[in-house]
Image (spheres, helix red, strand yellow):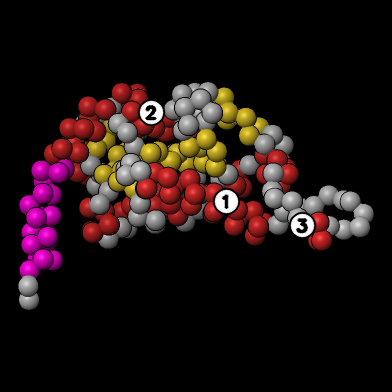
Amino acid sequence: MQASCPQCSQRITIDDAKVPDRPFSVRCPKCQNVVKLPGKGGNEAAAAPPSPASLPATPGPTTMTDDVRAQLMTQLRREMHTGGEESGVERALVVFPDPAQGGGISQTLSRLGYSTDTIDDFDEGARQLEQGAYAIVATARVGAAPGKPESLYQRLLRLSPEARRRLFVVLVGDEFRSGDSTQAFVTLADLVLQAKDAASADGYIRAYQAARRRLFQPMEEARKRVETAVI
């Protein structure tokens, strides 16, 4: 399920398997506003009604199948993501099992002008990552949960060198010292942040992104020369 905070327009993504049948509330990771959501029952009620010709003679309840729900959610995600791409705004992916953990870094990235997708499920985060549409990814350095194949951090470690170079990876956790280059190198991240600093990490992100651009600029220039060379 995806929704937008009515107060700050922050995208909120919740694993469909965790959505209860009844209406429920979540707290926006950006502004902490309480957002009321309809639950699975509300999603079914909001579905487009069938045509009159297909209605049964005796009115009765209709049920949305899992396949239809999945198709609608896929379409919703595609429509929500397209707006950011067309406007030229870079996108950020924030994935933490506990939405409160990602709230701080989501606030920072939004202030920096990113269109931020906040997700609480590693599997869904990995699917979104496969789109290749993100400039920055923030997550925790954790292993897979019981019964799950891998965490998003483990998925990031398996990226090809080319795909990895396109991403600025931020790891957030209490085990880190903010801006520690040694910890970032060891964990294969671009930047590590202490959890308490995540909500005010604008300076760290700007500085490390600038350093990263300086590092990769000669490689990018060489690549462009090769691509434009006449063979």
Q: Earlier in the sequence, mark 2 or mark 1?
A: 1
The three-letter code of the residue at mark 1 reads Met
Give the residue drawn at x 39%, y 56%.
Answer: 131
Q: Are marks 2 and 1 in contact (CB under 8 Å)?
A: no
Q: Earlier in the sequence, mark 2 or mark 3?
A: 3
Query: Residue 209: within the magenta?
Result: no
Q: Which residue is mark 3?
A: 51
Assess disc 1: are there few (<14), some (14-19) or many (≥20) residues with their C-alpha within 10 Å of its C-alpha. some
Q: Quadrant of the N terminus?
A: top right
Q: Which residue is mark 1?
A: 73
Q: Quadrant of the C terminus?
A: bottom left
The three-letter code of the residue at mark 2 reads Gln
Query: Residue 214: within the magenta?
Result: yes
Assess disc 3: are there few (<14), some (14-19) or many (≥20) residues with their C-alpha within 10 Å of its C-alpha. few
Query: Would you say residue 113 is visible in this rendering?
Result: yes
Residue at the extreme front: 52
Q: x, y percentage for residue 75?
A: 54, 53
The three-letter code of the residue at mark 3 reads Ser
